[in-house]
Image (cartoon, helix red, strand yellow):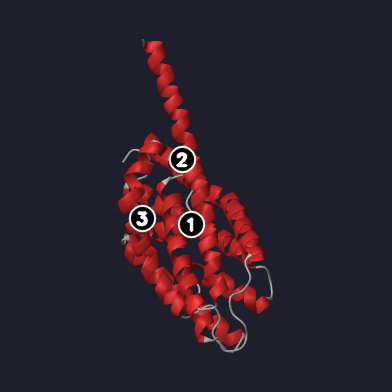
C-alpha cells in the first residue's frame, strides 16, 4: 500500500512539474507575442519596454537585443537592492542571520541570476515574433479602416500581454526582470507592489520621452497604447486569474 501511494505521489509530482513548466513557457511566448504586437501598431508601447523600444529605434539596433541589455541592467539593480536589504536586515538583527535567513538569501540571489538566461530566451522570442509580424502602419496618415485595425490589434496585444504575464508569474519559477525589479524596489522601499509598479511605469515613460525628444526630436513609443497598456494589462491579469488561477494552480501543484 505504501509503495502504491509513493508511486501515485511520484506520478502526480511529474505531472504537476510538466504542467508548471508548460504553463510558464506558454506564458512567456504569449507575453512576447503581446509585447511585439504592441510595438507593431505604432500607437504606443507598454511602459516596461518603452525605453528599450525607443533606444532601438533611435540607434537602429535590434529591439530584442536592446531589451536584453535593459533587462540585464534591471538584474544588476535587483542584486544591489537585495544586498542593501540584506545589510539592513543584518544590522537590525545585530549581526545575527539565521540558517533559514541564509537559505532565503541564497535563493533570492539565485532567482536574480537566473533572470539573465531567462531574458536571453525571452528576447529571442521577441526577435522571432518581430521578424514574422510586419508593421501595421506606414509613414503616411492612416485611413479610418487601417486605424480601426491597429486599435483592434492593440487591444488584442494588451490582452495577450496580460494573459502571458499572469501565466508566467503564477507558476512562481523565475520572474521576468521587469517584474523582478518592481518587487525588489517595493521590498527595499517598504511600499506596495501596485504603487511601486505605477511609479516605475511613470519613470520609464519619462526616460522614454526624454530620450525621444533629445535624440529624435519627436516622441517614440509613447501614445494612446501606452496609457491603455498601463490600465488594461493589470485588469486583464485580474480577470484571467479570476477564471483560471485555481485550475492552473491545481494542475501545476502550486500551494498557496
Q: Nearer the viewer, residue 115 or 154?
A: 154
Query: In the orientation shown, which residue stands out farthest toward the top?
Result: 1
**Crowd rating for badge 2 (residues with CA inside 10 Å; few <14, some 14–19, many 20+):** many
Mark 3 touching mark 1, by CB under 8 A? no
Q: Measure the alpha-carbon separation of dots 2 and 3.
A: 17 Å
Which callout, 2 or 1, points at the residue further toward the start of the chain?
A: 2
Q: Earlier in the sequence, mark 2 or mark 3?
A: 2
Task: Give the structural element (helix, strand or loop) at label 1.
Answer: helix
Vertical comparison of 68 with 40: above or below: above
The residue at which mark 3 appears reads as 240
Which quadrant of the structure image shows residue 192? bottom left
Q: Position of residue 113 (x, y in %)?
A: 55, 49
Q: Which mark is residue 20?
A: 2
- Identify the residue shown where x is 67% and y is 76%: 59
Instruction: Tell me the distance, in whole angstroms, between the alpha carbons under discs 3 and 1.
Output: 28 Å
Identify the residue shown where x is 36% and y is 65%. Answer: 196
What residue sits right under mark 1 in the picture? 78
Q: CA distance from mark 2 to mark 1?
A: 25 Å
**Disc 2 versus disc 1: nearer the observer:** 2
Which residue is more in the foreground, 38 or 55?
38
On residue 255, the disc is none
Amino acid at each position: 500500500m505504501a509503495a502504491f501511494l509513493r508511486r501515485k505521489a511520484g506520478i502526480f509530482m511529474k505531472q504537476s512539474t510538466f504542467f508548471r513548466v508548460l504553463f510558464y513557457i506558454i506564458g512567456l511566448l504569449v507575453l512576447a507575442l503581446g509585447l511585439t504586437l504592441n510595438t507593431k501598431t505604432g500607437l504606443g508601447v507598454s511602459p516596461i519596454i518603452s525605453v528599450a523600444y525607443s533606444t532601438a529605434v533611435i540607434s537602429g539596433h535590434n529591439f530584442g537585443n536592446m531589451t536584453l541589455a535593459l533587462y540585464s541592467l534591471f538584474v544588476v539593480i535587483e542584486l544591489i537592492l537585495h544586498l542593501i536589504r540584506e545589510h539592513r536586515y543584518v544590522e537590525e538583527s545585530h549581526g545575527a542571520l539565521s540558517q533559514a535567513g541564509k537559505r532565503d538569501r541564497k535563493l533570492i540571489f539565485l532567482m536574480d541570476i537566473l533572470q539573465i538566461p531567462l531574458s536571453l530566451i525571452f528576447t529571442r522570442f521577441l526577435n522571432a515574433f518581430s521578424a514574422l509580424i510586419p508593421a501595421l502602419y506606414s509613414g503616411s496618415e492612416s485611413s479610418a479602416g487601417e486605424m480601426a485595425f491597429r486599435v483592434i490589434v492593440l487591444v488584442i496585444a494588451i490582452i495577450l500581454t496580460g494573459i502571458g504575464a499572469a501565466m508566467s508569474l503564477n507558476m512562481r519559477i523565475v520572474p521576468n526582470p521587469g517584474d523582478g525589479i518592481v518587487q525588489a524596489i517595493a521590498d527595499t522601499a517598504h511600499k506596495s507592489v501596485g504603487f511601486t509598479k505605477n511609479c516605475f511605469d511613470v519613470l520609464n515613460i519619462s526616460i522614454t520621452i526624454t530620450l525621444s525628444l533629445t535624440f529624435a526630436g519627436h516622441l517614440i513609443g509613447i501614445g494612446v497604447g501606452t496609457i491603455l497598456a498601463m490600465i488594461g494589462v493589470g485588469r486583464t491579469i485580474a480577470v484571467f486569474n479570476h477564471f483560471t488561477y485555481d485550475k492552473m494552480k491545481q494542475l501545476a501543484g502550486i500551494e498557496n
